[in-house]
Image (cartoon, rainbow, N blue to C red):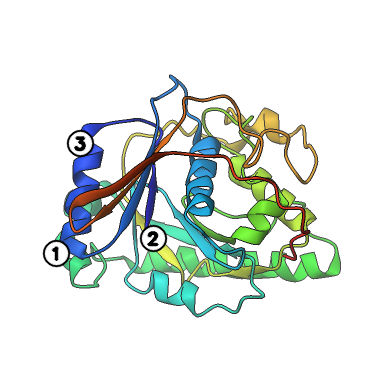
Amino acid sequence: MLVSCDVQDESIRALVAACSAELSLDITLVDRPHQNQCRLSQVRNNGLRAAIQLGASDQDLFAFIDGDCSPAPDHAARLAALPESISLVCAHRVELTPEQTESFDEAAVRDRRPPAAIRPGQLAALEKRQARSRRQAFLRRLGFSKGHKPKILGANFAVRLALARAVNGFDEAFIEWGAEDDDFSRRAYSAGARPHVGVRDIIVYHQHHPTRAPGKWADAPGVARFNQPGPTRCTLGLFSPMEQPTPVVRVYAAGACTSESQLAIPAVSSTRSTV
């Protein structure tokens, strides 16, 4: 497991250490000082950079989950069951209500159960979106789908490292909220990505909280950048980052930090990846 943060905070490090002890799990934490602006694309790229530095393979499938989301009990198993030919996974989330968030049951999560009683309408919404995304995937095979459809949801998606390499990761020119996931999916499809639609089955539970999201997608800060599409390999990305303080990579095992190093930028592979 790898945690990539947009801030350095001792309480986060303590939590990661505690989780590694409780879960008997090695956890890598990548962090650097906050830059007084949201750099989500850069933070995601930092996670990939750390994974590469630690020896990740091009065929490894990386699942991205936002910090305000709790994965369903079968989330990892469903991803692990996918064939290697799948390079991009379009998943989704259940939007927990304020009441469901308030009653969020950590004991249920530990017992591999949903953290709240999920309502039929919430499941029906997933079914509807699943059907729409599958239709978009079919149209894509015929050459009729929009460039970024079926879209990924930044809060819950997965990508093969080979594909992330091929598109130079996330575009770090996206600052603040929105559309960086639409941009990534558009460039991924341009690179030949084969999507798997798991909107209904590969889910996370999103906790309710105040949001920066505007009422309309078109009003999100990142949309202006999205409407100025660039090359399949973005200019500011995984192997060519926007300037930032050097992140620190810490590996925790059994509650203790077992290694600490600075994050290095991997060399660009001269071998063309197949995605």
Label 3 and label 1: CA atoms lie apart by 22 Å
Residue density around tag 1, few if under 14, some if 14–19, many if 20 or more, within 10 Å? few
Which residue is outermost to the top? 36
Label 3 and label 2: CA atoms lie apart by 24 Å
Q: Is residue 148 visible?
A: no
Measured along the vertical axis of the image, is residue 161 above or below residue 217?
A: below
Question: What is the three-letter code of the residue carrying label 3?
Answer: Ser
Q: Is residue 121 left or right of residue 89?
A: left
What secondary structure is found at the residue carrying circle 3? helix
Q: Nearer the viewer, residue 98 or 34?
A: 34
Label 1 and label 2: CA atoms lie apart by 16 Å
> Residue visible at 60% across and 79% down?
83
Reading the image, the residue beneath label 2 is: 204
What secondary structure is found at the residue carrying circle 1? helix
Residue density around tag 3, few if under 14, some if 14–19, many if 20 or more, within 10 Å? few
Reading the image, the residue beneath label 3 is: 11
The mark that comes first in sequence, 1 or 2, is 1
Question: What is the three-letter code of the residue carrying label 1?
Answer: Ala
Q: Quadrant of the C terminus?
A: bottom right
Measured along the vertical axis of the image, is residue 109 above or below residue 39?
A: below
Q: Is residue 69 left or right of residue 23?
A: right
- Quarter residue 228 falls in: top right
Residues at circles 3 and 1 in contact by the CB criterion of under 8 Å: no
The mark that comes first in sequence, 3 or 1, is 3
Residue density around tag 2, few if under 14, some if 14–19, many if 20 or more, within 10 Å? many
